[in-house]
Image (cartoon, rainbow, N blue to C red):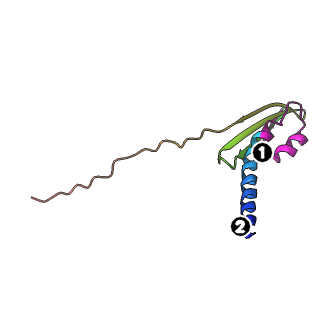
């Protein structure tokens, strides 16, 4: 009986972890043109970053897919509080190149 409970618990945890990863992509697909800021906030939560200028507003989210550990950036544009545009992508962040310098040479001078 104890073994069965452990197995069910393990399956439940796996299902939750996998569903969290899948929820991000399926939730992103629910964002539609014409949705209100409240509807978007209900789906995705509070934005990580917010920008606005002359009647337009932009919200930016970074979501992590738990099953792949990949980040997805979601940018949503609003005009008059309604979605006009959305973009989502996985950022391709590569570390900057590192300069490799030769080691300092030690010169030993032997007196004549």
Question: Looking at the image, which residue is at 71% across and 60% down?
Answer: 10
Label 1, on which residue?
23
- Residue found at the very far left of the displayed protein: 112
From the top left corner, tell me how far across and down residue 92 is, in percent.
60, 38
As helix, strand or loop, the secondary structure at mark 1 comes to helix
Disc 2 versus disc 1: distance between alpha carbons? Answer: 30 Å
- Front one among 63 and 97: 63
Q: Is residue 29 magenta?
A: yes
Determine whether the residue tagged by mark 2 lies in a helix, strand or loop: helix
Residue 24, percent from left and from top: 76, 43
Q: Residue at x 59, y 41 (%)?
A: 93
The answer to whether 67 appears left or right of 55 in the picture is: left
The quadrant of the rendering that contains the N terminus is bottom right
Quadrant into which the C terminus falls? bottom left
Q: Residue at x 71, y 40 (%)?
A: 73
Q: Which residues are magenta?
A: 26-53
Nearer to the camera, 75 or 105 = 75
Mark 2: few, some, or many residues within 10 Å (few <14, many ≥20)? Answer: few
């Amino acid at each position: 009986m104890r073994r069965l409970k452990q197995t069910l618990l393990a399956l439940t945890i796996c299902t939750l972890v996998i569903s969290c990863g899948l929820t991000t992509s399926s939730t992103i697909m629910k964002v539609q043109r014409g949705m209100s800021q409240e509807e978007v906030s209900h789906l995705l939560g509070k934005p990580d970053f917010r920008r606005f200028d002359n009647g337009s507003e932009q919200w930016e989210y970074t979501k992590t897919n738990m099953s792949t550990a990949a980040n997805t950036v979601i940018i949503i544009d609003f005009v008059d509080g309604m979605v006009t545009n959305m973009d989502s992508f996985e950022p391709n962040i590569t570390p900057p190149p590192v300069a490799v310098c030769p080691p300092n040479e030690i010169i030993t001078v032997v007196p004549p």
